[in-house]
Image (cartoon, rainbow, N blue to C red):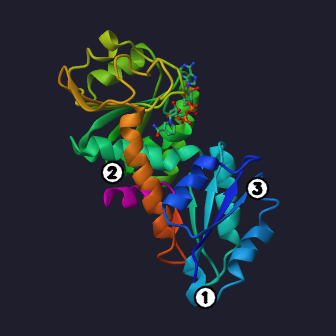
């Protein structure tokens, strides 16, 4: 029986990036739909649930993507609500690459330190990628400073993380001097700001002597952390290991493909942040 991946994208055009990865991951048939919302998704999900017998349902799976992560989360909630008993299919949510990119950043750092035993600063921590990186780190036991231009937005992100990781040691932090003070005591920093936003120049951020790993996910110049090259991969400079966006990108692609493959192992997997990080750990 052929594997079928049903791509539900919240943008008008289903992402070609996600389509390519689906094929490379081995999905034998790919049905792609754009403009999918909680209000129009029911028929698409019923079509997945009611066509194959319960024993064969693991050959059908759903991928939720699109540029708007909140829209993806709302869609995931609706899709999983439509399932009942054994009549369900596995689902992965990776809107804007948020989960796979965050997992890749934490796994890159794990090559050099134990991310659960660090103090970490996430610059741009309120965005989809930063939020999820902070959530993964908090779930591992790290002390996490979520940095934003707005302390209120940072606190809202921390509150959302505490809902998922009640014991999480997350705290909000401003940008500028407050973030620099947090960096002074941090072993790990991820710059997850919007494309083309520089948080600190190299001389400023690299004053932090505790830092062991610095990861910059920004693929559009200038880098979020000045001096980190886009292709840097475990580049050692001034006592800190550096990764740039493309340096992390290879791992992100591996995680994305492995997660799609995992969908076809059972009919009841829900691959969101935590589950995708668990897959990343096995690679
Ligand atoms: N390497 C990869 O494989 C990969 C994959 C996906 C994404 N990415 C990159 O990862 C980064 C994070 O992605 P994302 O979707 O989470 O980003 P995003 O939502 O566009 O931005 C993240 C945060 O940056 C902050 N920000 C925006 N403009 C700013 C400015 N002018 N000055 C300071 N802060 C600013 C915002 O926080 P506040 O408003 O709260 O300050 C925002 O929440 C992006 O650069 C993206 O291109 C890389």
Mark positioned earlier in the residue sequence (1 or 3)? 3
Q: Position of residue 114 (x, y in %)?
A: 23, 45
The disc placed on residue 36 is: 3
For mark 2, give the secondary structure: helix
Give the alpha-carbon distance from disc 1 to disc 3, as whole Å: 25 Å
x 65%, y 42%: residue: 67
Q: Quadrant of the C terminus?
A: bottom left
x 47%, y 17%: residue: 222
Give the alpha-carbon distance from disc 1 to disc 2, as whole Å: 35 Å
Q: Position of residue 91 (x, y in %)?
A: 58, 66
Mark positioned earlier in the residue sequence (3 or 2)? 3
Ligand 1 positioned in quadrant? top right
Q: Nearer the viewer, residue 1 or 102?
A: 1
Q: Quadrant of residue 202?
A: top left
In reply to whether residue 62 is colored magenta, the answer given is no
The disc placed on residue 172 is: none
Mark 3: few/some/many CA within 10 Å (<14, 14-19, 20+): many
Q: Quadrant of residue 47?
A: bottom right
Q: Nearer the viewer, residue 212 or 259?
A: 259
Please state which of the two labelled residues, at mark 1 or mark 2, is closer to the viewer.
Answer: 1
Side (left or right) of 252 relative to 85: left
In the depicted structure, whether residue 267 falls above or below residue 201: below
The disc placed on residue 54 is: 1
Q: Could you tell me if residue 210 is visible in this image? A: no
Q: Is mark 1 within 8 Å of ligand 1?
A: no
Residue at the limit of the structure toward the top, as seen here: 203
Side (left or right) of 161 relative to 183: right
User: What are the residue bounds of the magenta stretch?
Assistant: 272-283
């Amino acid at each position: 029986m052929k594997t079928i991946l049903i791509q539900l994208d919240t943008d008008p055009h289903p992402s070609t990036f996600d389509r390519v990865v689906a094929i490379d991951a081995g999905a034998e048939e790919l049905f792609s739909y754009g403009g999918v919302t909680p209000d129009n998704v029911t028929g698409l999900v019923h079509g997945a649930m009611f066509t194959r017998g319960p024993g064969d349902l693991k050959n059908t799976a759903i991928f939720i993507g699109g540029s708007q992560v909140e829209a993806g989360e709302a869609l995931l909630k609706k899709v999983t609500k439509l399932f009942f008993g054994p009549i369900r299919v596995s689902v992965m949510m990776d809107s804007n690459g948020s989960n796979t990119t965050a997992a890749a950043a934490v796994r890159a750092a794990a090559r050099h330190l134990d991310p659960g035993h660090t103090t970490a600063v996430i610059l741009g921590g309120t965005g989809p990628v930063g939020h999820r990186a902070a959530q993964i780190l908090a779930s591992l036991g790290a002390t996490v400073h979520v940095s934003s231009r707005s302390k209120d937005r940072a606190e809202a992100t921390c509150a959302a993380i505490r809902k998922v990781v009640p014991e999480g040691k997350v705290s909000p932090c401003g940008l500028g001097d407050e973030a620099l003070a947090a960096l002074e005591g941090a072993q790990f920093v991820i710059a997850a700001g919007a494309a083309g936003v520089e948080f600190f120049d190299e001389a400023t951020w690299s004053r932090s002597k505790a830092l062991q790993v610095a990861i910059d996910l920004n693929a559009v110049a200038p880098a979020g952390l000045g001096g980190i090259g886009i292709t840097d991969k475990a580049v050692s400079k001034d006592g800190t290991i550096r990764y740039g966006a493309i340096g992390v990108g290879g791992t992100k692609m591996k995680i994305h493909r492995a997660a799609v493959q995992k969908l076809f192992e059972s009919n009841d997997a829900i691959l969101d942040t935590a589950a995708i990080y668990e897959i990343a750990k096995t690679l």
